[in-house]
Image (cartoon, rainbow, N blue to C red):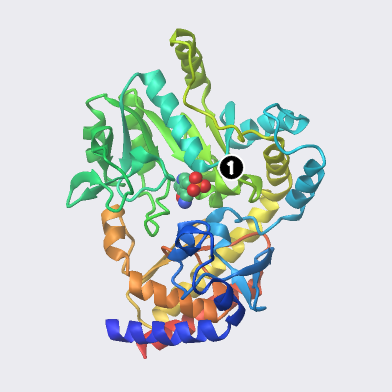
Amino acid sequence: MSSSRIDSIRAAEAKIFRKARPKSEAAVGKGVKGFFGGVPMHWMNDWPTPFPILVEKAKGATITDVDGNKLADFCLGDTGSMFGHSPAPVAKAIRRQSRRGLTYMLPSEDALVLGKLLSERFGLPHWQIATTATDANRFALRVARAVTNRPKILVFNGCYHGSVDETFVRLDNGKPANKPGLTGEFRDLTQGTKIVEFNDLPALEAALADQDVACVITEPVLTNCCMVLPEPGFLEGLRKATRATGTLLLIDETHTISTGPGGYTQRYGLEPDLFVLGKPVAGGVPASVWGISDELAARYEAYNRSKQPGYSGMGTTLSANPLQFAAMRAALEEVMTEENYAHMEKLAGRLAAGLEAAIAKHKLPWHVRRVGARVEFICAPGPLKNGSEADAAHASELEAAIHVALVNRGILIAPFHNMMLISPATTKAQVDRLISAFGDIAAQLTA
Ligand code: PMP
Protein backbone atom coordinates (compact mmCIF):
# COMPACT_ATOMS: atom_id res chain seq x y z
CA MET A 1 0.00 0.00 0.00
CA SER A 2 1.57 3.28 -1.05
CA SER A 3 2.41 5.75 1.69
CA SER A 4 0.93 8.64 -0.27
CA ARG A 5 -2.42 6.81 -0.42
CA ILE A 6 -2.26 6.22 3.35
CA ASP A 7 -1.35 9.89 3.95
CA SER A 8 -4.21 11.16 1.83
CA ILE A 9 -6.73 8.89 3.60
CA ARG A 10 -5.40 10.01 6.97
CA ALA A 11 -5.64 13.70 6.01
CA ALA A 12 -9.20 13.29 4.72
CA GLU A 13 -10.25 11.40 7.84
CA ALA A 14 -8.61 14.02 10.09
CA LYS A 15 -10.74 16.68 8.43
CA ILE A 16 -13.92 14.69 9.05
CA PHE A 17 -12.88 14.10 12.66
CA ARG A 18 -12.35 17.83 13.30
CA LYS A 19 -15.59 18.84 11.66
CA ALA A 20 -17.58 16.55 13.96
CA ARG A 21 -15.87 17.84 17.11
CA PRO A 22 -15.87 21.64 17.39
CA LYS A 23 -16.32 21.60 21.18
CA SER A 24 -13.58 19.01 21.73
CA GLU A 25 -11.25 20.99 19.50
CA ALA A 26 -11.96 24.28 21.28
CA ALA A 27 -11.37 22.66 24.68
CA VAL A 28 -8.36 20.41 24.05
CA GLY A 29 -7.23 21.09 20.47
CA LYS A 30 -4.36 23.26 21.62
CA GLY A 31 -3.72 21.35 24.84
CA VAL A 32 -5.27 21.83 28.28
CA LYS A 33 -3.74 24.60 30.37
CA GLY A 34 -2.08 23.50 33.57
CA PHE A 35 -0.92 20.15 32.24
CA PHE A 36 2.55 19.45 30.96
CA GLY A 37 2.22 18.64 27.27
CA GLY A 38 -1.42 19.73 27.39
CA VAL A 39 -2.82 16.47 28.79
CA PRO A 40 -3.17 14.99 32.29
CA MET A 41 -1.13 11.91 31.26
CA HIS A 42 1.13 11.94 28.24
CA TRP A 43 -0.33 8.70 26.78
CA MET A 44 -3.40 10.77 25.87
CA ASN A 45 -1.31 12.41 23.16
CA ASP A 46 -0.63 9.02 21.60
CA TRP A 47 -4.06 8.59 20.03
CA PRO A 48 -3.82 8.93 16.24
CA THR A 49 -6.72 11.41 16.16
CA PRO A 50 -5.79 15.10 15.58
CA PHE A 51 -6.56 15.78 19.26
CA PRO A 52 -7.94 13.68 22.13
CA ILE A 53 -11.69 13.20 22.26
CA LEU A 54 -13.19 15.07 25.21
CA VAL A 55 -15.52 12.59 26.86
CA GLU A 56 -18.82 13.58 28.39
CA LYS A 57 -19.72 10.14 29.67
CA ALA A 58 -19.28 6.42 29.12
CA LYS A 59 -21.79 3.72 29.91
CA GLY A 60 -21.75 0.05 28.97
CA ALA A 61 -19.80 -0.12 25.71
CA THR A 62 -20.63 3.40 24.52
CA ILE A 63 -18.66 6.63 24.92
CA THR A 64 -20.40 9.95 24.32
CA ASP A 65 -18.18 12.97 23.63
CA VAL A 66 -18.94 16.61 24.42
CA ASP A 67 -20.06 17.17 20.82
CA GLY A 68 -22.70 14.47 21.20
CA ASN A 69 -20.89 11.87 19.06
CA LYS A 70 -21.47 8.32 20.24
CA LEU A 71 -18.72 5.76 19.84
CA ALA A 72 -19.04 2.00 20.18
CA ASP A 73 -16.11 1.48 22.51
CA PHE A 74 -13.92 -1.53 21.71
CA CYS A 75 -10.91 0.01 23.48
CA LEU A 76 -12.59 -0.02 26.87
CA GLY A 77 -9.86 1.92 28.60
CA ASP A 78 -7.30 -0.50 27.14
CA THR A 79 -8.80 -3.27 29.32
CA GLY A 80 -9.52 -1.28 32.51
CA SER A 81 -13.19 -1.27 31.50
CA MET A 82 -13.28 -4.57 29.66
CA PHE A 83 -16.44 -5.52 31.55
CA GLY A 84 -18.15 -2.33 30.36
CA HIS A 85 -18.10 1.22 31.68
CA SER A 86 -19.51 1.50 35.20
CA PRO A 87 -21.03 -2.00 35.42
CA ALA A 88 -24.14 -1.68 37.58
CA PRO A 89 -23.02 -4.00 40.43
CA VAL A 90 -19.67 -2.20 40.69
CA ALA A 91 -21.30 1.25 40.59
CA LYS A 92 -23.67 0.13 43.36
CA ALA A 93 -20.78 -1.18 45.48
CA ILE A 94 -18.89 2.09 45.00
CA ARG A 95 -21.93 4.12 46.06
CA ARG A 96 -22.39 1.97 49.13
CA GLN A 97 -18.73 2.13 50.14
CA SER A 98 -18.54 5.88 49.50
CA ARG A 99 -20.68 6.35 52.59
CA ARG A 100 -18.34 4.24 54.73
CA GLY A 101 -14.91 5.69 54.06
CA LEU A 102 -12.58 5.33 51.09
CA THR A 103 -9.25 4.35 52.57
CA TYR A 104 -8.12 3.41 56.07
CA MET A 105 -5.25 0.91 55.83
CA LEU A 106 -7.38 -1.70 57.57
CA PRO A 107 -9.55 -4.52 56.22
CA SER A 108 -13.31 -4.18 55.81
CA GLU A 109 -15.82 -7.03 55.76
CA ASP A 110 -15.65 -7.22 51.96
CA ALA A 111 -11.98 -8.21 52.32
CA LEU A 112 -13.03 -11.31 54.26
CA VAL A 113 -15.00 -12.51 51.26
CA LEU A 114 -12.41 -11.39 48.73
CA GLY A 115 -9.59 -13.65 49.89
CA LYS A 116 -11.83 -16.66 49.40
CA LEU A 117 -13.09 -15.44 46.03
CA LEU A 118 -9.58 -14.95 44.65
CA SER A 119 -8.35 -18.34 45.86
CA GLU A 120 -11.36 -20.18 44.44
CA ARG A 121 -11.31 -18.29 41.16
CA PHE A 122 -7.64 -18.40 40.28
CA GLY A 123 -6.46 -21.53 42.08
CA LEU A 124 -3.66 -19.95 44.14
CA PRO A 125 -4.13 -19.79 47.89
CA HIS A 126 -2.26 -16.63 49.03
CA TRP A 127 -3.09 -13.11 47.81
CA GLN A 128 -2.11 -9.49 48.16
CA ILE A 129 -3.85 -6.42 46.81
CA ALA A 130 -2.06 -3.61 44.99
CA THR A 131 -3.29 -0.72 42.88
CA THR A 132 -1.85 -1.29 39.41
CA ALA A 133 -0.72 -4.34 37.48
CA THR A 134 2.67 -2.66 37.29
CA ASP A 135 2.93 -2.65 41.07
CA ALA A 136 1.66 -6.21 41.41
CA ASN A 137 4.32 -7.39 38.95
CA ARG A 138 7.05 -5.43 40.73
CA PHE A 139 6.13 -6.89 44.11
CA ALA A 140 5.80 -10.42 42.79
CA LEU A 141 9.21 -10.21 41.11
CA ARG A 142 10.73 -8.97 44.35
CA VAL A 143 9.36 -12.00 46.18
CA ALA A 144 10.71 -14.29 43.46
CA ARG A 145 14.21 -12.88 43.83
CA ALA A 146 13.97 -12.99 47.61
CA VAL A 147 13.04 -16.65 47.91
CA THR A 148 15.35 -17.95 45.17
CA ASN A 149 18.24 -15.69 46.14
CA ARG A 150 18.85 -15.27 42.41
CA PRO A 151 19.46 -11.88 40.82
CA LYS A 152 17.93 -12.15 37.37
CA ILE A 153 14.57 -12.36 35.69
CA LEU A 154 13.74 -13.56 32.18
CA VAL A 155 11.31 -11.91 29.79
CA PHE A 156 10.18 -12.67 26.25
CA ASN A 157 10.98 -10.27 23.45
CA GLY A 158 8.02 -7.96 22.80
CA CYS A 159 6.61 -8.30 26.31
CA TYR A 160 4.87 -5.58 28.28
CA HIS A 161 4.11 -5.87 31.98
CA GLY A 162 3.55 -2.21 32.87
CA SER A 163 6.25 0.25 33.82
CA VAL A 164 8.35 -2.36 35.59
CA ASP A 165 11.88 -1.09 34.98
CA GLU A 166 13.65 -4.42 34.69
CA THR A 167 11.30 -5.67 31.94
CA PHE A 168 12.29 -2.90 29.49
CA VAL A 169 14.69 -5.01 27.51
CA ARG A 170 14.37 -6.12 23.91
CA LEU A 171 16.28 -8.10 21.31
CA ASP A 172 17.98 -5.80 18.85
CA ASN A 173 19.12 -7.94 15.91
CA GLY A 174 19.26 -10.84 18.32
CA LYS A 175 21.22 -8.95 20.98
CA PRO A 176 19.70 -7.89 24.34
CA ALA A 177 19.51 -4.11 24.79
CA ASN A 178 17.56 -1.52 26.74
CA LYS A 179 14.32 -0.65 24.95
CA PRO A 180 14.78 2.54 22.98
CA GLY A 181 13.02 5.66 24.23
CA LEU A 182 13.18 4.98 27.98
CA THR A 183 13.16 8.27 29.87
CA GLY A 184 15.96 8.80 32.36
CA GLU A 185 17.19 5.20 32.31
CA PHE A 186 20.91 5.17 33.03
CA ARG A 187 21.31 1.48 33.88
CA ASP A 188 22.12 -1.33 31.52
CA LEU A 189 19.00 -3.37 32.23
CA THR A 190 20.40 -6.39 30.42
CA GLN A 191 22.63 -6.97 33.45
CA GLY A 192 19.61 -8.16 35.44
CA THR A 193 17.25 -9.32 32.72
CA LYS A 194 17.67 -12.15 30.26
CA ILE A 195 15.57 -12.13 27.14
CA VAL A 196 14.66 -14.75 24.54
CA GLU A 197 12.02 -15.03 21.85
CA PHE A 198 8.56 -16.38 22.71
CA ASN A 199 7.98 -19.88 21.27
CA ASP A 200 11.72 -20.64 21.34
CA LEU A 201 12.13 -23.46 23.86
CA PRO A 202 15.79 -24.27 23.11
CA ALA A 203 16.76 -20.60 23.71
CA LEU A 204 14.73 -20.55 26.90
CA GLU A 205 16.31 -23.76 28.19
CA ALA A 206 19.79 -22.44 27.44
CA ALA A 207 19.06 -19.15 29.24
CA LEU A 208 17.76 -20.96 32.34
CA ALA A 209 20.59 -23.49 32.45
CA ASP A 210 22.89 -21.16 34.45
CA GLN A 211 20.34 -21.26 37.29
CA ASP A 212 20.70 -17.54 37.94
CA VAL A 213 17.16 -16.61 36.90
CA ALA A 214 14.72 -16.12 39.78
CA CYS A 215 11.62 -15.93 37.65
CA VAL A 216 10.24 -15.99 34.13
CA ILE A 217 7.51 -13.40 33.75
CA THR A 218 5.16 -13.75 30.80
CA GLU A 219 1.67 -13.43 29.47
CA PRO A 220 0.41 -16.81 28.20
CA VAL A 221 -0.35 -15.07 24.90
CA LEU A 222 1.71 -12.00 23.99
CA THR A 223 -0.97 -9.34 23.65
CA ASN A 224 1.14 -6.22 23.65
CA CYS A 225 3.07 -6.81 20.42
CA CYS A 226 0.17 -7.41 18.04
CA MET A 227 -0.93 -10.84 19.23
CA VAL A 228 1.36 -13.86 19.39
CA LEU A 229 -0.20 -17.17 20.43
CA PRO A 230 1.85 -19.91 22.08
CA GLU A 231 2.66 -22.76 19.72
CA PRO A 232 1.45 -26.22 20.81
CA GLY A 233 3.67 -27.45 23.66
CA PHE A 234 5.37 -24.11 24.32
CA LEU A 235 3.68 -23.30 27.63
CA GLU A 236 4.10 -26.90 28.80
CA GLY A 237 7.78 -26.70 27.86
CA LEU A 238 8.12 -23.41 29.69
CA ARG A 239 6.70 -24.91 32.88
CA LYS A 240 8.94 -27.95 32.54
CA ALA A 241 12.08 -25.90 31.93
CA THR A 242 11.38 -23.55 34.84
CA ARG A 243 10.75 -26.46 37.21
CA ALA A 244 13.87 -28.31 36.06
CA THR A 245 16.06 -25.30 36.86
CA GLY A 246 14.43 -24.12 40.09
CA THR A 247 13.10 -21.04 38.29
CA LEU A 248 9.76 -19.57 39.30
CA LEU A 249 7.01 -18.81 36.77
CA LEU A 250 4.93 -15.64 36.95
CA ILE A 251 1.89 -15.56 34.69
CA ASP A 252 0.59 -12.04 34.06
CA GLU A 253 -3.11 -12.38 33.22
CA THR A 254 -3.87 -8.68 33.02
CA HIS A 255 -4.91 -8.96 29.37
CA THR A 256 -5.57 -12.69 28.96
CA ILE A 257 -8.31 -12.57 31.57
CA SER A 258 -10.27 -12.14 28.34
CA THR A 259 -10.11 -15.97 28.09
CA GLY A 260 -12.63 -16.75 30.82
CA PRO A 261 -13.54 -16.14 34.48
CA GLY A 262 -10.34 -17.82 35.73
CA GLY A 263 -8.15 -16.46 32.94
CA TYR A 264 -5.97 -18.47 30.58
CA THR A 265 -4.43 -20.16 33.62
CA GLN A 266 -7.61 -21.92 34.64
CA ARG A 267 -8.79 -22.61 31.08
CA TYR A 268 -5.55 -24.31 30.05
CA GLY A 269 -4.38 -25.67 33.40
CA LEU A 270 -1.20 -23.60 33.70
CA GLU A 271 0.46 -23.98 37.05
CA PRO A 272 2.16 -20.67 37.83
CA ASP A 273 4.02 -20.02 41.07
CA LEU A 274 2.97 -16.40 40.91
CA PHE A 275 -0.10 -14.89 39.26
CA VAL A 276 -0.85 -11.25 38.49
CA LEU A 277 -4.07 -9.58 37.42
CA GLY A 278 -4.69 -5.84 37.27
CA LYS A 279 -6.74 -3.34 35.29
CA PRO A 280 -10.31 -4.74 35.04
CA VAL A 281 -10.35 -6.79 38.25
CA ALA A 282 -12.29 -4.09 40.13
CA GLY A 283 -14.45 -3.09 37.15
CA GLY A 284 -12.43 0.09 36.49
CA VAL A 285 -11.52 1.10 40.03
CA PRO A 286 -7.70 1.08 40.23
CA ALA A 287 -6.81 -2.27 41.76
CA SER A 288 -4.66 -5.32 41.12
CA VAL A 289 -4.01 -8.66 42.78
CA TRP A 290 -1.06 -10.99 42.98
CA GLY A 291 -1.19 -14.51 44.24
CA ILE A 292 1.35 -17.17 45.16
CA SER A 293 1.32 -20.94 45.57
CA ASP A 294 1.44 -22.80 48.91
CA GLU A 295 5.02 -23.82 48.30
CA LEU A 296 6.13 -20.30 47.50
CA ALA A 297 4.24 -18.90 50.49
CA ALA A 298 6.13 -21.28 52.78
CA ARG A 299 9.44 -20.21 51.27
CA TYR A 300 8.50 -16.54 51.54
CA GLU A 301 7.59 -16.97 55.20
CA ALA A 302 10.94 -18.64 55.86
CA TYR A 303 12.68 -15.81 54.00
CA ASN A 304 10.86 -13.21 56.09
CA ARG A 305 11.89 -14.96 59.29
CA SER A 306 15.51 -14.96 58.18
CA LYS A 307 15.86 -11.50 56.70
CA GLN A 308 17.01 -8.34 58.41
CA PRO A 309 14.14 -6.37 59.84
CA GLY A 310 13.22 -3.26 57.85
CA TYR A 311 10.95 -2.00 55.09
CA SER A 312 10.21 -4.58 52.40
CA GLY A 313 10.16 -2.09 49.53
CA MET A 314 6.70 -3.40 48.68
CA GLY A 315 3.20 -2.01 49.06
CA THR A 316 1.75 1.47 48.57
CA THR A 317 -0.34 3.51 50.98
CA LEU A 318 -3.61 3.51 49.04
CA SER A 319 -3.44 -0.19 48.18
CA ALA A 320 -5.91 -2.64 49.71
CA ASN A 321 -8.43 0.06 50.49
CA PRO A 322 -12.12 -0.66 51.17
CA LEU A 323 -13.25 0.89 47.88
CA GLN A 324 -11.09 -1.67 46.05
CA PHE A 325 -12.48 -4.51 48.18
CA ALA A 326 -16.07 -3.47 47.48
CA ALA A 327 -15.56 -2.95 43.75
CA MET A 328 -13.51 -6.13 43.32
CA ARG A 329 -16.02 -8.24 45.19
CA ALA A 330 -18.83 -6.92 43.01
CA ALA A 331 -16.78 -7.46 39.84
CA LEU A 332 -15.83 -11.03 40.74
CA GLU A 333 -19.23 -12.07 42.07
CA GLU A 334 -21.57 -10.31 39.67
CA VAL A 335 -19.70 -9.15 36.57
CA MET A 336 -16.92 -11.62 35.73
CA THR A 337 -19.47 -14.42 35.46
CA GLU A 338 -19.68 -17.48 33.18
CA GLU A 339 -22.81 -16.00 31.66
CA ASN A 340 -21.14 -12.69 30.77
CA TYR A 341 -18.10 -14.48 29.40
CA ALA A 342 -20.33 -16.63 27.18
CA HIS A 343 -21.76 -13.45 25.64
CA MET A 344 -18.26 -11.96 25.20
CA GLU A 345 -16.91 -15.15 23.62
CA LYS A 346 -19.77 -15.41 21.16
CA LEU A 347 -19.50 -11.82 19.94
CA ALA A 348 -15.70 -11.96 19.81
CA GLY A 349 -15.99 -15.03 17.55
CA ARG A 350 -18.43 -13.12 15.36
CA LEU A 351 -16.08 -10.13 15.18
CA ALA A 352 -13.01 -12.21 14.31
CA ALA A 353 -14.91 -14.09 11.58
CA GLY A 354 -16.31 -10.83 10.17
CA LEU A 355 -12.89 -9.19 9.99
CA GLU A 356 -11.37 -12.29 8.42
CA ALA A 357 -14.08 -12.30 5.76
CA ALA A 358 -13.43 -8.63 4.94
CA ILE A 359 -9.68 -9.28 4.71
CA ALA A 360 -10.30 -12.22 2.35
CA LYS A 361 -12.81 -10.24 0.25
CA HIS A 362 -10.34 -7.41 -0.31
CA LYS A 363 -7.39 -9.79 -0.73
CA LEU A 364 -5.36 -8.03 1.93
CA PRO A 365 -2.23 -9.81 3.24
CA TRP A 366 -3.47 -9.39 6.84
CA HIS A 367 -4.65 -11.72 9.58
CA VAL A 368 -6.76 -11.83 12.76
CA ARG A 369 -5.95 -13.36 16.16
CA ARG A 370 -8.12 -13.83 19.20
CA VAL A 371 -7.80 -14.82 22.83
CA GLY A 372 -11.35 -15.06 24.20
CA ALA A 373 -12.94 -11.61 24.21
CA ARG A 374 -9.79 -9.91 22.88
CA VAL A 375 -9.44 -9.66 19.11
CA GLU A 376 -6.59 -8.18 17.09
CA PHE A 377 -6.23 -7.53 13.37
CA ILE A 378 -2.68 -7.40 12.12
CA CYS A 379 -1.78 -5.61 8.89
CA ALA A 380 0.73 -8.28 7.86
CA PRO A 381 0.61 -12.00 7.08
CA GLY A 382 0.54 -14.39 10.01
CA PRO A 383 0.53 -16.14 12.33
CA LEU A 384 3.32 -14.30 14.11
CA LYS A 385 5.71 -16.48 16.06
CA ASN A 386 7.48 -14.02 18.33
CA GLY A 387 8.18 -10.40 19.29
CA SER A 388 10.61 -9.75 16.46
CA GLU A 389 8.05 -10.85 13.89
CA ALA A 390 5.44 -8.73 15.66
CA ASP A 391 7.75 -5.73 15.55
CA ALA A 392 8.23 -6.16 11.82
CA ALA A 393 4.46 -6.54 11.33
CA HIS A 394 3.66 -3.11 12.80
CA ALA A 395 2.49 -0.61 10.21
CA SER A 396 2.11 2.52 12.34
CA GLU A 397 1.03 5.00 9.63
CA LEU A 398 -1.45 2.62 8.06
CA GLU A 399 -2.87 1.63 11.45
CA ALA A 400 -3.24 5.29 12.48
CA ALA A 401 -5.21 6.03 9.30
CA ILE A 402 -7.49 3.04 9.95
CA HIS A 403 -8.06 4.04 13.58
CA VAL A 404 -9.18 7.58 12.71
CA ALA A 405 -11.35 6.26 9.89
CA LEU A 406 -12.98 3.88 12.38
CA VAL A 407 -13.67 6.74 14.82
CA ASN A 408 -15.37 8.61 11.99
CA ARG A 409 -17.58 5.56 11.52
CA GLY A 410 -18.51 5.45 15.21
CA ILE A 411 -15.93 2.92 16.42
CA LEU A 412 -13.14 3.36 18.97
CA ILE A 413 -10.36 0.77 19.16
CA ALA A 414 -7.21 0.81 21.29
CA PRO A 415 -4.33 3.05 20.22
CA PHE A 416 -0.77 1.65 19.74
CA HIS A 417 -2.04 -1.52 18.07
CA ASN A 418 -5.28 -2.97 16.66
CA MET A 419 -6.86 -4.41 19.76
CA MET A 420 -10.61 -4.76 20.19
CA LEU A 421 -12.38 -5.93 23.32
CA ILE A 422 -15.87 -7.30 23.73
CA SER A 423 -17.59 -6.51 27.02
CA PRO A 424 -20.74 -7.97 28.52
CA ALA A 425 -22.45 -4.73 27.44
CA THR A 426 -21.25 -4.88 23.82
CA THR A 427 -24.10 -5.56 21.39
CA LYS A 428 -24.28 -7.58 18.19
CA ALA A 429 -25.21 -4.34 16.39
CA GLN A 430 -21.98 -2.71 17.61
CA VAL A 431 -19.92 -5.67 16.42
CA ASP A 432 -21.62 -5.59 13.03
CA ARG A 433 -20.99 -1.86 12.77
CA LEU A 434 -17.27 -2.47 13.38
CA ILE A 435 -17.16 -5.24 10.77
CA SER A 436 -18.91 -3.07 8.22
CA ALA A 437 -16.70 -0.01 8.97
CA PHE A 438 -13.60 -2.18 8.65
CA GLY A 439 -14.83 -3.54 5.29
CA ASP A 440 -15.56 -0.02 4.10
CA ILE A 441 -12.04 1.14 5.01
CA ALA A 442 -10.47 -1.98 3.47
CA ALA A 443 -12.33 -1.16 0.24
CA GLN A 444 -10.98 2.41 0.31
CA LEU A 445 -7.45 1.22 0.93
CA THR A 446 -7.53 -1.23 -1.95
CA ALA A 447 -9.51 0.92 -4.42
N1 PMP B 1 0.60 -6.41 32.40
C1 PMP B 1 0.12 -6.45 31.17
C2 PMP B 1 0.07 -7.76 30.45
C3 PMP B 1 -0.34 -5.30 30.55
O1 PMP B 1 -0.81 -5.35 29.30
C4 PMP B 1 -0.29 -4.08 31.25
C5 PMP B 1 -0.78 -2.78 30.65
N2 PMP B 1 -1.05 -2.78 29.32
C6 PMP B 1 0.22 -4.08 32.55
C7 PMP B 1 0.66 -5.26 33.09
C8 PMP B 1 0.31 -2.82 33.34
O2 PMP B 1 -0.91 -2.33 33.75
P1 PMP B 1 -0.95 -0.92 34.49
O3 PMP B 1 -0.57 0.09 33.45
O4 PMP B 1 -2.37 -0.79 34.91
O5 PMP B 1 0.00 -0.96 35.61
Residue 37 x/y as whole percent = 45, 62
User: In front: 191, or 317?
Assistant: 317
- The answer to whether residue 250 is visible is yes
Dot 1 amino acid type = Gly
Residue 147 x/y as whole percent = 41, 19
Residue name at image x 52 percent, y 69 percent: 52
User: In front: 7, or 214?
Assistant: 7
- Can you identify the residue that label 1 sits on? 262
Residue name at image x 29 percent, y 85 percent: 4
Residue 399 x/y as whole percent = 39, 72
User: In front: 228, or 175?
Assistant: 175
For residue 402, above or below residue 369: below
Q: Quadrant of the C terminus?
A: bottom left
Q: Quadrant of the N terminus?
A: bottom left
Q: What is the count of numbered marks?
A: 1
Residue 3 x/y as whole percent = 28, 81
**For the residue labelled by badge 1, is the local secondary structure a helix, a strand or a loop?**
loop
Residue name at image x 74 percent, y 47 percent: 334
